[in-house]
Amino acid sequence: MDPTIPTSFIPKRPITSESMQGSSYSTRSSSVGLLTLITVVVVIATAVSFGGVYLYEKRLSSQKTTLEDSINTARDGIGSEFVSDMQRLNARISGVQELLNSHIVVSPIFTELQNTTLRSIQYSQFKYDIGTDTVTKASIVKVDLGGTARSYSTIALQSDAFSDSKIIKNPVFSNLNVDDKTGRVEFKLAFTVAIDDLSYQKFFESINKAQAATEQSTSIIPQ
């Protein structure tokens, strides 16, 4: 008799819920392990970053202390008395500079009159006053002159000559009158000069330039 061939492959032991639970537990264990690894990495990275920031802060603090010590050492080496002397010297230099900037000389006016006045013009009066330009509000020097001319045409020519002047501005002739004894024309002359054109510093610089030009011209003359 042929042996009985089993016709069913159904396992004798039924699949229980325990096997399903085991598979689910294995999946959860893997997820928990990955999350733990990520957490550990983040914690380590944070600790390393904090340590770097802490060390950098310590380094900056050390540099600050070293710099403060150097400043204090230099200050102690100079001495407070020396610093006070330097401050007083600086104040004096500033005062002298301000005085030079505000000081004026009238020599350039005489030089300009000498260079621009015609020979038939004679001056007999001269005075000046510091004022303010009504238009520009800048400081100016007002000059008043009195004199005589050979004729009215001479005064007209003199007015044209002043137009070429670099410092004489707004020349005005007035009070024209013929002297019966001499026949000459008496006049009053008024003009203005910018305060900067009369500054002592500018005048001093012009003298130095003139001296330098003279020395240069002398040096090129053949011996």
Image (cartoon, rainbow, N blue to C red):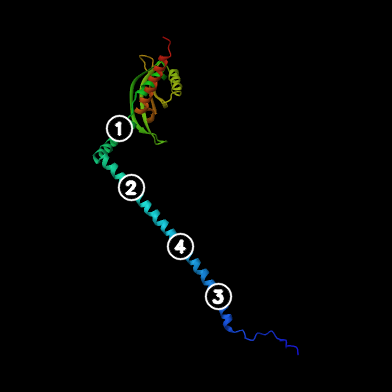
Q: Residue at x 51, y 70 (%)?
A: 33
Which residue is denoted by mark 3 in the rendering? 26
> Callout 3: few (<14), some (14-19), or many (20+) C-alpha neighbours within 10 Å?
few
Residue at the farthest front position: 1
Of the residues under marks 4 and 3, which one precedes in the sequence? 3
Instruction: Indicate the quadrant where residue 109 lies.
Output: top left
Would you call the spot at circle 2 few (<14 residues within 10 Å), some (14-19), or many (20 or more)? few
Distance from disc 3 to disc 2, alpha carbons, whole Å, reads 60 Å
Amino acid at dot 2? Thr
Report the front residue among 211 and 135.
211
Placement of 40 over or under 87, stated as above or below? below
> What crowding class fits label 1: few (fewer than 14 Cα within 10 Å), some (14-19), or many (20 or more)?
few
Residues at marks 3 and 1, CA–CA distance in whole angstroms = 94 Å
Location of the N terminus (image quadrant): bottom right
Report whether residue 215 is seen: yes
Comparing labels 1 and 4, the label whose residue is closer to the camera: 4
Relative to the observer, which residue lies in front, 66 or 215?
A: 66
Residue at mark 2 to residue at mark 1: CA–CA distance: 40 Å
Work out whether 60 lies above or below 222.
below
Residue linked to disc 2 = 66
